Amino acid sequence: MADTSQQRALKNYRGRLRQRGMSRFEVIGLDDDRELIRSLAKRLAEKGPEASWIRAAVTQTIETKPSKKGGILAALRRSPLVGADLKITRPMVRERKLDL
């Protein structure tokens, strides 16, 4: 069976996209986010330094890797106050009555 002109046009269009390293796909989302998703896709397709930055930021935001244990402890150990022998005292005060 012969292709219709519309089918040939669509086939040619998708071939040109493939040559540019791009593809067309459909996503499902909120109607309010339509322009946001379109502008994001347009920026990512530009392949410039801004696209790389956006791609990294979005990837980092939606990444679902669990955080490593000991992250706070490692940050405290990197502190410039490590080994400073600080003597931190807190004055002892009587309990006070709170009026709620």
Image: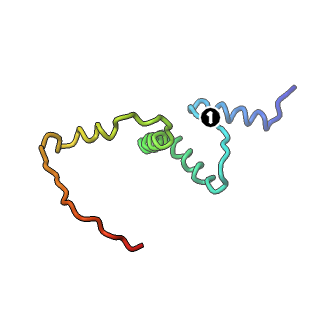
In this rendering, is residue 10 above or below 32? above
- Measured as percent of width and height from the top left, residue 59 is found at 48, 39
In this rendering, is residue 94 above or below 53? below
- Measured as percent of width and height from the top left, residue 20 is found at 56, 33
Left or right, residue 78 beside residue 97: left
Residue 48 at least partly seen: no
| Quarter of the image that includes the C terminus | bottom left
Pick the residue in front: 99 or 1. Answer: 99
Left or right, residue 1 beside residue 37: right
| Quarter of the image that includes the N terminus | top right
In this rendering, is residue 39 above or below 46? below
Q: Residues within 10 Å of mark 1 (few under 14, many from 20)?
A: few
Residue at x 76% of width, y 33% of height: 8
Pick the residue in front: 94 or 65. Answer: 94
Left or right, residue 2 beside residue 19: right
Q: Secondary structure at mark 1?
A: loop
User: Circle 1 is placed at which residue position?
Assistant: 23
Residue at x 22% of width, y 63% of height: 93
In this rendering, is residue 8 above or below 89? above
Pick the residue in front: 26 or 70. Answer: 70
- Measured as percent of width and height from the top left, residue 69 is found at 38, 34
Residue at x 46% of width, y 35% of height: 66
Kind of residue at disc 1: Ser
- Measured as percent of width and height from the top left, residue 14 is found at 67, 33
Rendering quarter of residue 72 = top left
Residue at x 36% of width, y 70% of height: 98
Residue 5 at least partly seen: yes
Extreme top residue here? 1
